[in-house]
Amino acid sequence: MLINALRVLAACAVVVLPLTAATPAQAETVGLHEAVASLPVAAESREGYQRTAFRHWVDADRDGCHTRAEVLIAEAVDAPEVGPGCKITGGRWHSWYDDTDVSGAATIDIDHMVPLAEAWDSGASAWSAERRQAYANDLDADRSLAAVTARSNRSKADQDPATWMPPHQPSHCRYLEDWTATKLRWHLTVDTDEHITLQELVASCPNTPLTYTPAP
């Protein structure tokens, strides 16, 4: 009888295993000068690039507003009205690339701090489609996307700091901080010209503590 009872208990036993969850990435802080020096240097290749490889804009949280609208709402100096279907009217924005105030969203672009083509050249060509989508719609880091004038965004196009910097010179250090933090966040490389230029340019900027969180 005792043996039978033990067999029943064994059959009913539930094995409880410890639950493990992925540890979220921790924010990292490093001086701007050291951050630039730490960027991995590698040759770039645009082979196979298509803008459609980065799906955007998406409504990741399904609240009715896609990424462009989310950035417009978040960065408005004067809040716009948000109507049905996330239609945005009114509002005012300050484009820090060219120190310009803009009323109405029609002439505002949402710039990828590190352009999609540059990201492709710097490592995103090896990513999954899901990771490229996450990059193109990165609302988890304030530095990744910027509401700026269409004029300044289209002047920049897919260039890196070796060939383009914001026309508003007082914004240069901020731009270098955001560029460097975005490359570090997404584990992107820099080419030789880009690295040399970044080091030369940040030499005239304060060694500001640069905080970024590595992307999942």
Image (tube, rainbow, N blue to C red):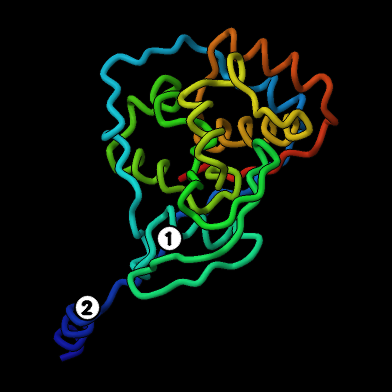
Is 60 on the left or on the right of 27, as rendered?
A: left
Label 2: which secondary element: helix
The quadrant in which residue 205 appears is top right
Give the labeled residue for mark 1: 20
Please state the horizontal and vertical placement of residue 29, each as a whole percent of the image: 72, 41
Label 1: which secondary element: loop
The quadrant in which residue 195 appears is top right
In this picture, is 94 found above or below 49? below
The crowd level at tag 2 (other Cα within 10 Å; few <14, some 14-19, many 20+) is few
95, 215: nearer the viewer: 95
Give the distance between the C-alpha atoms of the residues marked 2 and 1, in whole angstroms.
26 Å
Is 91 on the left or on the right of 64, as rendered?
A: right
78, 114: nearer the viewer: 78
Please state the horizontal and vertical placement of residue 191, each as a whole percent of the image: 53, 12
Give the labeled residue for mark 2: 10
Please give the count of numbered marks on the rendered protein: 2
Q: Residue at x 33, y 25 (%)?
A: 125
In the rendered structure, are the residues bearing label 2 and label 1 in contact, judged by CB atoms less than 8 Å apart? Answer: no
40, 17: nearer the viewer: 40
Q: What residue type is labelled 1?
A: Thr
Q: Which amino acid does label 2 sit on?
A: Ala
Please state the horizontal and vertical placement of residue 4, each as a whole percent of the image: 14, 86
Q: In which quarter of the image is the C terminus?
A: top left
In this picture, is 135 found above or below 58? above
Please state the horizontal and vertical placement of residue 39, each as a whole percent of the image: 61, 22
Report the mark closest to the observer, 2 or 1: 1
